[in-house]
Amino acid sequence: MIDYNETRGISKETLNELLQELNPDFIKKLPDTPQEILKFAKRRVNPYISENINETLAKQMLETRQTDKEYLLTLFKAMTITFINGQDPSQHPVAAVLVSQTGAGKTSLRELINPQNQVYVVINPDLYKKYRSDADKIREKDRTHFGALTGIDSYDHAAKIRTYAMEKGYNILIEVAPSLQQGLIGVDEKELEEHGYQLDLHVMAVGDLVSAISIHHRYETSIFVYNGQGDTKLTDLHRHDESYLAVSECLEGMDPERISLYIRGKNAAIPPKKIPTEGKTMTEILNMLQRERSVSNYAYVVGSGEPSFISDYQEILQLMQKRNAPQEEYEQLNNIYGRYVHYKSQIKSAEGR
């Protein structure tokens, strides 16, 4: 059986070689000495690849793993941006974990909970992908799978930064699209408890149809705004579906007093709204989660929300046609459209009774 937790360190020789190439002003921006950070730069011996990833893509992911020097450089870059606001460690640290499926709107929730990134140190593996020196090359070669090809290292970078932040006692904010196999990826309750952290879970209640189309909308917007640069990636629909199912599973057994539930605003300009859960049992909270998800899907399908599925779908389709998108991206969008037809049929059937 493969041990995915086995790690190895990076040598001091590799660190010294890298330091000779770095600008002293850059080194000063690090939250700690390079030698101290090196202690946390452990690499997985056997990188974890989801069972949903096909064999060809899995092989490509392994081939894009960084060398130790490249990995360390990216870690340094990621740490400078993570601690850029100069937050101080806390005597009573809090770990705020934002939980939802991909495309549900964790970014808007983060902005609500952590305005201007002043309260928490934000740990976001997607943000670290673009700091690879070969990020643009990978994106140009295979934009569709950019997230997977870079994620094989960026999730490890996030784990190392999280471990460093916990050791030092920073308030941390972690965005999680959970997994059925790995649970709350990057969140170890026992480890947080050992470091004296209070764990707060902030959960987005968003319908799966809404979030599925959102991953395409976000992708097209990123291509248009950033010309394919930055954090541009299209999430695989299988990954989206898995994370949707995993949310409720991950919440079971948690302390209901530590859970806050939110729904999306009617449009991007409106922040998420908190749903009262005080005094509720976990069963009641899970029922509320499912109910709000259903309400979200219903409004999106019948067009009572702002925007509606059809308006978003047509906008995305036009943008894809304009840039001559790859066939596999059309296939994924068509799959989502099929779900819309199914939901609409269910609603009509229920209303006709």
Image (cartoon, helix red, strand yellow):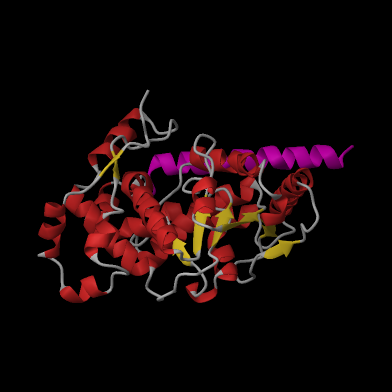
* Residue extending furthest toward the top: 1
Q: Position of residue 224 (x, y in %)?
A: 41, 63
Position of 49 relative to 123 (above/below): above
Along the viewing direction, whichever of 89 and 113 lies nearer the viewer: 89
Magenta highlight on residue 203? no
Q: Quadrant of residue 345?
A: top right
- Residue 11 seen in the current view: yes
| Residue 215, horizontal then vertical, whole percent | 51, 52
**Whole-percent x, y for residue 219 in the image:** 45, 55
Question: Residue at left 53%, top 46%?
Answer: 190
Rendered residue at 71%/53% (across/down):
296
Above or below, comparing residue 57 to residue 163 in the picture: above
**From which residue to which does the magenta span run?**
325-353
The answer to which of 333 and 72 lies nearer the viewer is 72
Q: Measured from the top left, where is residue 192 in percent x and y?
A: 51, 52
In the image: residue 278, left or right of residue 47? right
Q: Where does the C terminus fall, quadrant-wise? A: top right
User: Which residue lies at the image location 51% right of the left edge and 34% below the top edge?
Assistant: 181
The secondary structure that dominates the magenta segment is helix
Answer yes or no: is residue 337 visible.
Answer: no
Quarter location, residue 342: top right
**345 drawn magenta:** yes
Q: The N terminus appears in which quarter of the rendering?
A: top left
Residue 226 located left or right of residue 13: right
Q: Residue at x 79, y 46 (%)?
A: 284
